[in-house]
C-alpha cells in the first residue's frame, strides 16, 4: 500500500549552520512518526544532512540534478554524485525549475531516466498555472505533463516514483488549493495511472500535494482519500511548523 509522506523542500534557504540547527531541532521531535519524512536542503548542505540523519527516520533528497553522468556541464551535479554521498531521492520538475530554468518535459524525461538508472527515487512535480485553471484547462495540462515525462516508464520503474501535484498559483502565495480541488486532481491522476499503467501501480503510488500547506490546513488536505501527504516549502523551514504538518497524519 502507498505510504504517507511529508517532504520539506527548503529551496535556496539555510546556510550550513542553519541547516545543522534545523536538522538537530527536527531530530529531537521526529521519533515515533509513521509518516515518511524527507528534507531537501541545498546541494552544499546535502552531505552534512546525510551524516546528521543517518540513524534517523529522516531521508534526504536533492532538489535537482543533471541528466548526464559526468562531463562538461559547469555548475551541474549528477545522480552518481548524489548517490556517492548517500542521497537516494531527487525532486524533479518543480515549477520553479520549469519556469526559471526552462526545464521542459523532454529534459525532465531525460533526468527521470538518469535517476532511475542510478536507482534513485524521484519526487516528480507537476501542476497548472492560474490561467490554465481559470480557463478550465488544468486537467489537460496535468495530463500532458505526466504523459510527456512518464509515459515511457516500465511498470517496475513506478516503484521509484512519488508524484507531487503543485498548482503553480498555490506555491508561496498563501492561497492553497481547497481540499476538494486537491482531491479532484489527485483522483484524476490516480485514474490516469490506473488506465495507462495498471491498478496495482495506481494503488501503490503516493501522490503528494504542494502549495501553501501550513500547520492549520494540513490535516484537512491530508484527510482526502487520494492525498498521501505533502511537499512543503516555506513551512518546512520551521521545525515546529513542519512537525505539526507531519503530525497531521496520525502518530504511533
Ligand atoms: P510553499 O509551501 O512555500 O507554497 O511551497 C511549495 C513548494 O513549492 C514545495 O515544493
Image (tube, helix red, strand yellow):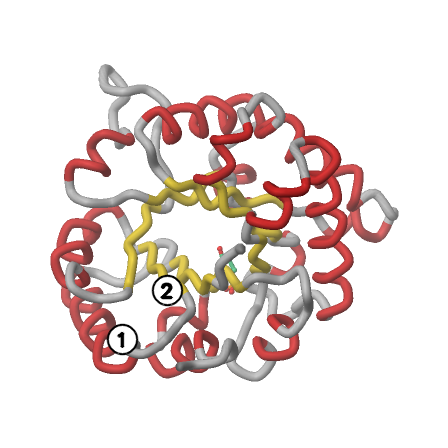
Q: Position of residue 42 (x, y in %)?
A: 28, 51
Left or right relative to 239: residue 233:
right
- The quadrant where residue 202 appears: top right
Residue at x 78% of width, y 48% of height: 131
Is disc 2 placed on a helix, strand or loop? strand
Query: Vertically, is 138 above or below 29?
Result: above
Q: Where is residue 134 in the image (x, y as percent from the top left)?
A: 84, 52
Mark 2 Cα-neighbour bin, 10 Å: few <14, some 14–19, many ≥20? many
Q: Nearer the viewer, residue 157 or 123?
A: 157
- The quadrant where residue 90 appears: top left
- The quadrant where residue 246 appears: bottom left
Query: Vertically, is 227 above or below 144?
Result: below
Residue topped by disc 2: 37
Residue at x 18% of width, y 74% of height: 24
Q: Is mark 2 within 8 Å of ligand 1?
A: no
* Rendered-image quadrant of the C terminus: bottom left
Residue at x 66% of width, y 68% of height: 176
Query: Vertically, is 121 above or below 212?
Result: above
Left or right relative to 226: residue 30:
left
Q: Nearer the viewer, residue 7 or 192?
A: 192
Callout in the foreground (1, 2)? 2
Residue at x 57% of width, y 84% of height: 216
Mark 1 Cα-neighbour bin, 10 Å: few <14, some 14–19, many ≥20? some
Earlier residue among tags 1 and 2: 1
Q: Nearer the viewer, residue 164 or 212?
A: 164
Left or right relative to 157: residue 182:
right
Is disc 1 placed on a helix, strand or loop? helix
**In this rendering, does residue 239 appear at all?**
yes
Residue topped by disc 1: 26
Q: Check contact, mark 1 vs mark 2: CB within 8 A.
A: yes
Q: Where is residue 229 in the image (x, y as percent from the top left)?
A: 53, 64
Amino acid at each position: 500500500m502507498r505510504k504517507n509522506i511529508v517532504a520539506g523542500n527548503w529551496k535556496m534557504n539555510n546556510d550550513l549552520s542553519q541547516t545543522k540547527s534545523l536538522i538537530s531541532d527536527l531530530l529531537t521531535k521526529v521519533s515515533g512518526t509513521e509518516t515518511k519524512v524527507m528534507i531537501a536542503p541545498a546541494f552544499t548542505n546535502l552531505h552534512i544532512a546525510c551524516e546528521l540523519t543517518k540513524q534517523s527516520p529522516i531521508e534526504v533528497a536533492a532538489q535537482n540534478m543533471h541528466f548526464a553522468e559526468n562531463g562538461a556541464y559547469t555548475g551541474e551535479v549528477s545522480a552518481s554524485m548524489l548517490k556517492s554521498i548517500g542521497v537516494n531521492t531527487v525532486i524533479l520538475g518543480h515549477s520553479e525549475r520549469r519556469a526559471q530554468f526552462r526545464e521542459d518535459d523532454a529534459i525532465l524525461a531525460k533526468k527521470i531516466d538518469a535517476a532511475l538508472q542510478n536507482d534513485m527515487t524521484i519526487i516528480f512535480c507537476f501542476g497548472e498555472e492560474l490561467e490554465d485553471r481559470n480557463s478550465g484547462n488544468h486537467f489537460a495540462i496535468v495530463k500532458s505533463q505526466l504523459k510527456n515525462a512518464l509515459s515511457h516508464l516500465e511498470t517496475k520503474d513506478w516503484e521509484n516514483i512519488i508524484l507531487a501535484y503543485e498548482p503553480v498559483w498555490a506555491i508561496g502565495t498563501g492561497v492553497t488549493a481547497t481540499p476538494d480541488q486537491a482531491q479532484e486532481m489527485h483522483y484524476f491522476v490516480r485514474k490516469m495511472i490506473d488506465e495507462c499503467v495498471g491498478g496495482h501501480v495506481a494503488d501503490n503510488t503516493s501522490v503528494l500535494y504542494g502549495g501553501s500547506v501550513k500547520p492549520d490546513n494540513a490535516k484537512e488536505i491530508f484527510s482526502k482519500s487520494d492525498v498521501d501527504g505533502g511537499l512543503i516549502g516555506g513551512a518546512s523551514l520551521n521545525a515546529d511548523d513542519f512537525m505539526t504538518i507531519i503530525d497531521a497524519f496520525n502518530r504511533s
